[in-house]
Amino acid sequence: MLLAATPPRSTRPATPPLVKRFLDYLFNECGLAGNTISAYQRDLNEFWNHLAELDVYLADLSMQDLQAHLVRLQERGLSIASISRHLMSIKMFLRFLHTERLIRHDLATLIETPRQWNRIPHSLHVPEVDALLSAPAPDDEYYLRDRALLELMYATGLRVSELSSLDVGQVNLKVGYLRCIGKGNKERIVPIGRPAIDAVTEYLDALRPQLLRERRSSKLFLSRTGRALDRTNMWRLVHKYGRMAGIRKNVHPHLLRHCFATHLLSGGADLRVVQELLGHADVTTTQIYTHVDPLRLKHVHQKCHPRP
């Protein structure tokens, strides 16, 4: 039976106390990143609101109620991956409540996560990446910043959230590496190539002081107002330059991360090294990039097979 922490039916808040208690646990005990916790919060608020509409308490929750919620998500057109994420949020929430003895039965043990196909991530060919990196026009007011942003994104494979939170002090251009704080507050060291070093150096010397003006900011990439360039604006910039480069695919920051991993592996990089560079906790996450380019497959076959 659910304890008295359950809010009254007429005063259910946007984020109920039980959900907030679970989110505090994820932050304080599990050390999850803010973006991950925000995703849990959105999923669980939606789940809670659905229960409120059904007039169902967690203590009375049944598998039929859970299935009804999943059907609603499917009717909204959510992908299997999105529904799986919702389901994982609910499972962890229910398991937490059962561990804290806030509910009697752990329905999480009865919930089976839907299986997903391991999709090969989209990527760009090297000439397409070259066109993207060359897209910023030298006469543009923010050319130096945008060129440095694109070069560093492709050179390091950072997540856009990691890049937007990157401080100047975390980048060592003399040695050629940066120190990144990734998911779960884990730190990793990522090398930087010469083109990215040159682009970032020029941006730091010539444009960043102008953008900063009288403001004080430790962030590497700044907006025109001198504030930190956020993830949304970085996404817009990459998308804009993708169109300017004439690339028909949907170009976004995570696509450059895919390109970084795919091009390293196709060039002969070790899988474990790429895992470390990407900041993946599990090597199976990195293995999705081990698909073979069809042209390279044909070349290897013609070169190695005794009767090509």
Image (spheres, rainbow, N blue to C red):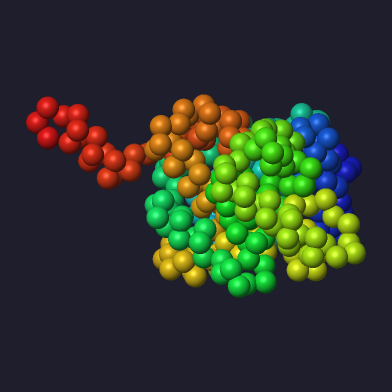
Name above or below for residue 202 compared with residue 210. above
Residue 279, percent from left and from top: 61, 35
Residue 120, percent from left and from top: 41, 45
Whether residue 27 appears in this view of the structure is yes
Q: Residue at x 85, y 55 (%)?
A: 217
Which residue is nearer to you in this view: 232 or 87?
A: 232
Name above or below for residue 135 compared with residue 179. below
| Image quadrant in which the C terminus is located | top left
| Image quadrant in which the N terminus is located | top right
Whether residue 6 appears in this view of the structure is no
Which residue is nearer to you in this view: 205 or 72?
A: 205
Q: Residue at x 48, y 47 (%)?
A: 259
Residue 136, percent from left and from top: 56, 66
**Left or right relative to 54: residue 254:** left
Q: Residue at x 29, y 41 (%)?
A: 296
Q: Quadrant of residue 307?
A: top left
Q: Residue at x 51, y 61 (%)?
A: 134
**Left or right relative to 226: residue 78:** left
Residue 237, percent from left and from top: 61, 65
